Amino acid sequence: MIPSFDSIDQKITRWMAIHGIRLLRYSIGFIFIWFGALKYFPDLSPAQELATSTIDLLTFGLIPMHVSLWFLATLEVGIGILLLSGSWIRLTVALLFFQMGGTLMPVVLFPELVFTAVPYALTIEGQYIIKNVVIISAALVIGSTARGGKIAV
């Protein structure tokens, strides 16, 4: 007997509800580890110059570039490891929001690097920054599980 579309759809939906949040944690954790690790190696991260310029402006130049880049790399790798582990979700999401706050700053601080025509035409750097809205939204979903929240199955 061939299962009905509704039966197959229910099974797929159930699978997504059971595994979706964990897969969000893993995929975002992997991205944070990868992008963070690149920052440990000079000139390997395409975001290095923009990140260090942003941190330099926000800290009034008080933190040397190599220190700020090392701090950012460690923060990002740490967030990634915490996401992969599933431990301390509330802390992890708070750190992620802190990091994302800095990531979004160039929109205000360096609009000439983010837009080819303000406010709608993005440069590649602008696209790199704006796509983080998806990561922020995913972090909200992940954070909703900190006290046992689940997707209804």
Image: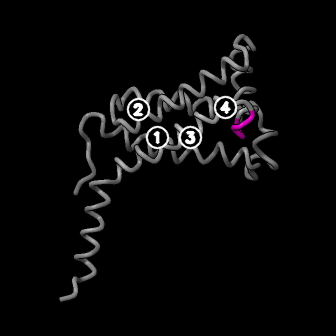
Q: Which residue is mark 1?
A: 29
Asked if the residues shown at circle 2 and circle 1 are in contact, with their CB atoms under 8 angstroms apart, the answer is: yes
Q: Earlier in the sequence, mark 2 or mark 1?
A: 1
Distance from the alpha carbon under mark 4 to that under mark 2 = 24 Å
Asked if residue 44 lies in the magenta stretch, the reply is yes
Q: Which residue is mark 2?
A: 82
Task: For label 3, count other residues whose C-alpha is less than 10 Å away and answer few (under 14), some (14-19) or many (20+).
Answer: some
Q: Which residues are magenta?
A: 43-47
Task: For label 1, count other residues whose C-alpha is less than 10 Å away and answer few (under 14), some (14-19) or many (20+).
Answer: many
Q: Earlier in the sequence, mark 4 or mark 3?
A: 3
Q: Which residue does the image show at 58% across and 34% down from the upper left?
A: 36
Distance from the alpha carbon under mark 2 to that under mark 1 = 7 Å
| Image side of residue 45 versus residue 22, left or right | right
Distance from the alpha carbon under mark 4 to that under mark 1 = 22 Å
- In percent of width and height, residue 137 lies at 47, 45
Query: If the image is split into quadrants, where does the N terminus sit?
Result: bottom left
Distance from the alpha carbon under mark 3 to that under mark 1 = 9 Å
Chief SS of the magenta region:
loop
SS under mark 3: helix
- In percent of width and height, residue 35 lies at 59, 39
Q: Which residue is mark 4?
A: 105
- In percent of width and height, residue 134 lies at 52, 48
The amino acid type, in three-letter code, at marker 3 is Trp
